Image (cartoon, rainbow, N blue to C red):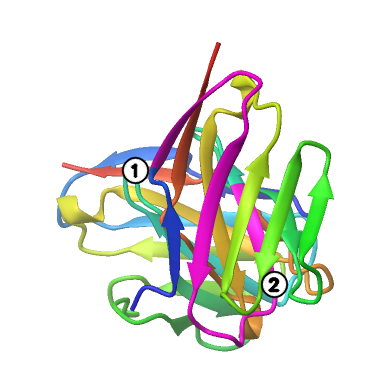
Amino acid sequence: QQQVKQSPQSLIVQKGGISIINCAYENTAFDYFPWYQQFPGKGPALLIAIRPDVSEKKEGRFTISFNKSAKQFSLHIMDSQPGDSATYFCAVTGTASKLTFGTGTRLQVTL
Amino acid sequence: SAVISQKPSRDICQRGTSLTIQCQVDSQVTMMFWYRQQPGQSLTLIATANQGSEATYESGFVIDKFPISRPNLTFSTLTVSNMSPEDSSIYLCSVVSPLSLRAFFGQGTRLTVV
């Protein structure tokens, strides 16, 4: 059973544009919603995360929007840069700190 | 934060053999997690390793195929047994900060089975 659905699978954005990646989850017991960034040959690294008691969190060019009633959350990358080209995974955490990852989005930022 | 070292970083193995992957953390942690990431795919949790008790395996993963050791609070190993080409993947270990819930990952072990 897929608990986290992520879209799109791949995304091409011009430099300076906005990248938007969406995730939807099913289990309302989840209480922590992180986004991880992964470069080739590296393990994922936390980019930004949100708890369900707020609807938006911004850190620099990265913003998470969270819609608890719709069970959806999204990552917005403003002023996208070529260095942002990577694979992005949303995730959810519930009991025992176990992460369930989305399917991933491969982002390419072109010049 | 936590720094995780994984060894080996990559290996090419013959089918039917076994490979043991080591994971060392620079701080004591209660739980360590092992993930599999097949080429171009997402991460799937294999098992949770607790010090002093048997690992807890996720659906689809069994101890005979993926035995795990956790001899102390900073170290764990994952063995991939009786390998087949379908086991070709990246294997990652991870720890989670209990306060922030932030997960830290090793750089992964890229396994190719021929």
Disc 2 residue type?
Tyr
Which one is closest to the eye, mark 2 or mark 1? 2
Q: Position of residue B51 (x, y in %)?
A: 64, 80
Chain letter, disc 2 residue: A
Q: Name above or below for residue B77 compared with residue A110.
A: below
Image point (68%, 73%), residue name = B72
Q: Name above or below for residue A23 compared with residue A47.
A: below
Q: Which mark is residue A32?
A: 2
Q: Position of residue B56 (x, y in %)?
A: 48, 84
Q: Quadrant of residue B1?
A: bottom right
Residue placed farthest to the top in the image? A111
Disc 1 residue type?
Gly
Q: Which mark is residue B40?
A: 1
Distance, label 2 to label 1, CA atoms, is: 25 Å
Residue count near mark 2 (Cα–Cα under 10 Å), binned few <14, some 14–19, many ≥20: some
Q: Is residue A18 magenta?
A: yes
**Residue toward you, B101 or B20:** B101
User: Judging from the image, what secondary structure is the residue with disc 1 in?
Assistant: loop
Q: Is residue B52 magenta?
A: no
